[in-house]
Image: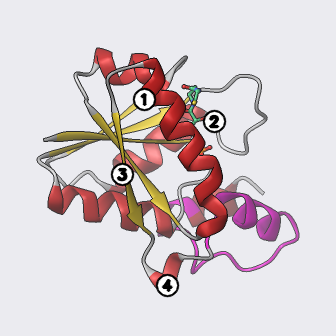
C-alpha cells in the first residue's frame, strides 16, 4: 500500500523524520507531499524543504518527496494514493486533524490514518523550532543535522 504524508515541513523536524521513517517500515511506499502555500510566509523555500527531505531519505528506497499546490485530495488522486498518514502529537492536535480528515473524506474517496508521535518528539513542532531559532536558542536536538546547518547558514 502507498500512503501520502503531507505537510508544510517548515522546517522538517525530528518528529517529522520519525513519523516518515516509521511509515516507510509499515507501508510499501511513502510519498511525502510538501505543500506550496503562497499565502503563508515560510522560513524555508519549498525547494529547500524538498531538498532537505531528499537528502535525509536518499538511502531509503520507498520514500519519494514531491511538492504540491492546491487541494490535498487532488494531489493524492493524481498520485494514485488512497490514504494519507498524519502524526498526532497530543490531543491538542486531534480536533483540527479530525476535522481535516472528515473534510477530506467528504471531498474524495480517501482515508486518513493517524499515527502517534513517539514520546521523545511529542512536544516538537515546526512553529516552536522557528520561534526558538529566531531568539537564537539551541534547536540542534530538534531538527536533522542538514536542516540545522541550513538554518544556521541562513541566519
Ligand atoms: O504541516 P501542516 O502545515 O499541518 O500541513 C497542513 C496540510 C499541508 C496537510 C494542509 O494545509 C493541506 O492539506 N493543504 C492543502 C490544501 C487543502 O487540501 N486544504 C483543505 C484541507 S481540509
How crowded is the residue under tag 2: few (<14 C-alpha within 10 Å), some, or many (20+)? few
Percent position of residue 122, x then y:
55, 76
Q: Image quadrant for the C terminus?
A: bottom right
| 142 inside magenta stretch | yes
Marks 3/4: CA–CA distance: 23 Å
Residue 110 in the figure: left or right of residue 73:
left
Residue at the (52%, 77%) spot, across then down: 121
Residue that carries the numbered disc 3 in the rendered image: 55
Among numbered discs 4 and 1, the one appearing first in the sequence: 1
Residue that carries the numbered disc 4 in the rendered image: 120
Percent position of residue 58, x then y:
25, 51
Percent position of residue 18, x then y:
38, 68
Q: Image quadrant for the N terminus?
A: top left
Among numbered discs 2 and 4, the one appearing first in the sequence: 2
Residue at the (84%, 63%) spot, across then down: 134
Marks 3/1: CA–CA distance: 32 Å
Residue that carries the numbered disc 2 in the rendered image: 45
Marks 2/4: CA–CA distance: 27 Å
Range shown magenta: 124-147
Nearer to us in this view, 138 or 104:
104
Among numbered discs 1 and 2, the one appearing first in the sequence: 2
Q: Are marks 3 and 1 in contact (CB under 8 Å)?
A: no
Residue 105, numbered circle: 1
How crowded is the residue under tag 1: few (<14 C-alpha within 10 Å), some, or many (20+)? some
Marks 4/1: CA–CA distance: 31 Å
Marks 1/2: CA–CA distance: 29 Å
* 4 or 1: mark nearer the eye: 1
* 3 or 4: mark nearer the eye: 4
Q: Are marks 3 and 4 in contact (CB under 8 Å)?
A: no
Percent position of residue 130, x then y:
75, 60
Amino acid at each position: 500500500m502507498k500512503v501520502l504524508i503531507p505537510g508544510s515541513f517548515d522546517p522538517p523536524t525530528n518528529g517529522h523524520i520519525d513519523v516518515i521513517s516509521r511509515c516507510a517500515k509499515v507501508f510499501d511506499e511513502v510519498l511525502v507531499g510538501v505543500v506550496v502555500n503562497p499565502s503563508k510566509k515560510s522560513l524555508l523555500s519549498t525547494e529547500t524543504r524538498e531538498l532537505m527531505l531528499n537528502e535525509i531519505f536518499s538511502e531509503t528506497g520507498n520514500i519519494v518527496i514531491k511538492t504540491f499546490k492546491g487541494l490535498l485530495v487532488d494531489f493524492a488522486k493524481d498520485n494514485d494514493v488512497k490514504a494519507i498518514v498524519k502524526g498526532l502529537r497530543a490531543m491538542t492536535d486531534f480536533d483540527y486533524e479530525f476535522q481535516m480528515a472528515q473534510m477530506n473524506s467528504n471531498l474524495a474517496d480517501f482515508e486518513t490514518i493517524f499515527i502517534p508521535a513517539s514520546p521523545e518528539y511529542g512536544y516538537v513542532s515546526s512553529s516552536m523550532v522557528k520561534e526558538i531559532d529566531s531568539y537564537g536558542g539551541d534547536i540542534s536536538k530538534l531538527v536533522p543535522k542538514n536542516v540545522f546547518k541550513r538554518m544556521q547558514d541562513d541566519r
